[in-house]
Image (spheres, helix red, strand yellow):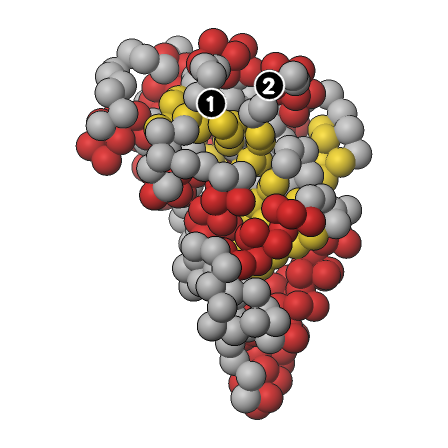
């Protein structure tokens, strides 16, 4: 019996051929593949500019740099995320301020953000967790008339929409990751999109040691080497052509799981806000106290059935030693802390079979009767 992992990259013949072509071309570093990929991704997202990077972390770092984060500036984000959301802000010397999540959507709560704004707040980083989109309308109302910018961490939500707009396009800059487990991937990679030519230019320089592409060894600006390879861009280009199909398959799998689990008491299924379409990077269920199995017992039962699962995330950022210096303590973000204790993500990617979906549903049903 084959094991169904929580995530699994899909690599077809066309990805292999695309990489082979690049290897044979001799142009392995950043070149025409990267340029084509940027154009294709911008078109897909409906944004004016796209800048590719060698990771999602690099894209966030470049985005914050372009938004002019200076030491001491405050960056507000959620503690219920991957460290890559917050670490680039620390790299720029910013003060990371956490705001709690909405317990229903797991996304940053606009009202919590509002209570954290100070004259030093420069950027808010909402995270489009699990493939959904943050509440951009509510957040836009809150930052209106303030000089606060929004960097949307859309690393888990490429292709999702809110009121017809693609994820990544909902703030001033949006970032994606093409790490091996994401909805589309190239091993390691990332991108930022924006409609501002000024921000795009700053990010383009930042990934290239502050040089402009026209004037090598002229350092106009601070920067690092965050360039994407043509080898990986070639993979990403193929994957982008399949993204819509794959995201639809994830949505179909999500709807099968939802239909099967809807009658199971004492668990909470993911909710989709009106006029939004999640791309289900994860299908995350909350196991409440009254469910007969503990979360670890459930994980064990799934494992016995050769089904992987994941906990995103086992602990909120503010409780890790790395973020202790921000001065937070247990109890500061009760919604995020409770979510960390209760969530479990079930495999939902295109390679999950109908049989495995049925098995998962049966495990929940059996446990609850
Ligand atoms: C994957 C991810 C990133 C970026 O990760 P990289 O591994 O650097 O590409 C950032 N934020 C979130 C929420 C992510 O899931």
Count of numbered circles on the image? 2
Residue shown at the point (38%, 23%) measured from the top left: 97
Label 1 to label 2, Cα distance in Å?
A: 9 Å
The residue carrying mark 1 is 121
Residue 332 falls in image quadrant: top left
Residue 150 falls in image quadrant: top right
For the question of whether residue 84 can be seen, the reply is yes
Question: Which mark sits nearer the N-terminus, 1 or 2?
Answer: 1
The residue carrying mark 2 is 146
Residue shown at the point (65%, 75%) measured from the top left: 32
Taking the view exactly as shown, the residue that stands out farthest to the left is 321
Q: Quadrant of the N terminus?
A: bottom left
Q: Which mark is residue 90?
A: none
- Is the C-beta of the residue carrying label 2 under 8 Å from the nearest atom of ligand 1? no
Answer few, some or many: residues within 10 Å of disc 2's Cα (few below 14, many 20 plus, some between 14 and 19): few
- Is the C-beta of the residue carrying label 1 under 8 Å from the nearest atom of ligand 1? no
Residue 360 vs residue 342: left or right? right
343 shown above or below 240: above
Marks 1 and 2 in Cβ contact (< 8 Å): yes
Taking the view exactly as shown, the residue that stands out farthest to the right is 164
């Amino acid at each position: 019996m084959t094991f169904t992992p929580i995530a699994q990259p899909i690599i077809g013949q066309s990805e292999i051929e695309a990489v082979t072509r690049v290897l044979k071309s001799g142009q392995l570093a950043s070149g025409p593949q990267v340029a084509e990929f940027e154009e294709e991704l911008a078109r897909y997202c409906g944004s004016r500019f796209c800048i590719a990077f060698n990771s999602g972390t690099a894209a966030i770092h470049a985005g914050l740099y372009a938004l002019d984060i200076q030491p001491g500036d405050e960056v507000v984000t959620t503690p219920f995320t991957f460290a890559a959301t917050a670490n680039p802000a620390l790299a720029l010397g910013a003060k990371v301020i956490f705001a709690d999540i909405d317990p229903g959507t797991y996304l940053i709560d606009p009202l919590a953000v509002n209570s954290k704004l100070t004259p030093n707040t420069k950027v808010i980083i909402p995270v489009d967790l699990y493939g959904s989109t943050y509440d951009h309308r509510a957040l836009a109302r809150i930052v209106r008339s303030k000089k606060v910018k929004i960097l949307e961490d859309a690393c888990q939500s490429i292709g999702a929409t809110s009121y017809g707009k693609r994820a990544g396009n909902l703030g001033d800059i949006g970032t994606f990751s093409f790490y091996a487990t994401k909805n589309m991937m190239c091993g390691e990679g990332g991108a930022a999109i924006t409609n501002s030519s000024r921000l795009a230019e700053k990010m383009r320089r930042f990934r290239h040691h502050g040089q402009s592409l026209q004037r090598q060894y002229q350092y106009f600006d601070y920067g690092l080497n965050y360039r994407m390879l043509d080898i990986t861009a070639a993979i990403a280009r193929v994957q982008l052509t399949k993204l819509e199909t794959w995201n639809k398959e994830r949505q179909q799998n999500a709807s099968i799981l939802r239909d099967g689990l809807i009658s199971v008491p004492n668990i909470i299924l993911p909710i989709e806000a009106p006029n939004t379409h999640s791309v289900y990077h994860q299908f995350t269920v909350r196991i409440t106290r009254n469910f007969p199995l503990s979360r670890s017992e459930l994980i064990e039962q799934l494992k016995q059935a050769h089904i992987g699962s994941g906990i995103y995330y086992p602990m909120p950022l503010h409780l890790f030693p790395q973020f202790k210096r921000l001065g937070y303590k247990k109890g500061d973000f009760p919604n995020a802390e409770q979510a960390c204790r209760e969530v479990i993500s079930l495999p939902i990617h295109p390679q999950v079979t109908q049989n495995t979906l049925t098995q998962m549903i049966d495990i929940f049903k059996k446990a609850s009767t």
